[in-house]
Amino acid sequence: MRVITRAYGDVPLDREVIGQANGLVYVANPSTVVSTETGERVGVGFPRQYVFRFEPQLFDSLNEAWERRDLAQLESLWSRAQQIH
């Protein structure tokens, strides 16, 4: 499942869920998912509250706000993101 993760510093990342365990959602860069499907489980665990449903327009807006370092806009955009279930 493709998701947006809220990384350190509010950086939005386009990621692919590769697993879930111990209250964490494990994600990987989409370019590395092919290798994870062959048995290598390489990913980063994010707390569920930092993993959101992928919406292309929202992701683009988050990136633009992050590049401008517009903290108010970032907070507003993150508040509209829908957490995954």
Image (cartoon, helix red, strand yellow):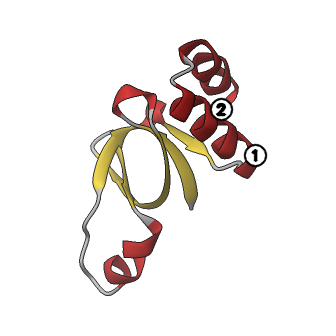
Determine the secondary structure under disc 2: loop
Q: Say which label, 1 or 2, has the lower sequence index.
A: 1
Residue type at tag 1: Gln
Can you tell which mark lies on residue 57? Answer: 1
Task: Please identify the quadrant where the C terminus is shown.
Answer: top right
Q: Position of residue 47 (x, y in %)?
A: 36, 35
Label 1 crowd (10 A; few <14 / some 14-19 / many >=20): few
| Frontmost residue, 68 versus 15 | 68
Q: Position of residue 1 (x, y in %)?
A: 56, 62
- The answer to whether residue 83 shows anywhere in this view is no
Q: Residue furthest bottom?
A: 38
| Frontmost residue, 33 versus 31 | 31
Q: Residue furthest front?
A: 68
Q: Position of residue 49 (x, y in %)?
A: 47, 30
Label 1, label 2: how many angstroms apart (C-alpha)? 11 Å
Can you tell which mark lies on residue 30? Answer: none
Residue type at tag 2: Ala
61 sits to left or right of 23: right
Can you tell which mark lies on residue 81? Answer: 2
Q: Badges 1 and 2: C-beta atoms under 8 Å apart?
A: no
Residue 21, compared with residue 1, is above or below; it is: above
53 sits to left or right of 50: right
Q: Position of residue 40 (x, y in %)?
A: 24, 78
Q: In the image, what residue occupies the spot 25% across and 67% down? A: 42
Determine the secondary structure under disc 1: helix
Label 2 crowd (10 A; few <14 / some 14-19 / many >=20): some
User: Mark 1 or 2, which is nearer the eye?
Assistant: 1
Residue 77, compared with residue 44, is above or below; it is: above
Q: Residue furthest right?
A: 57
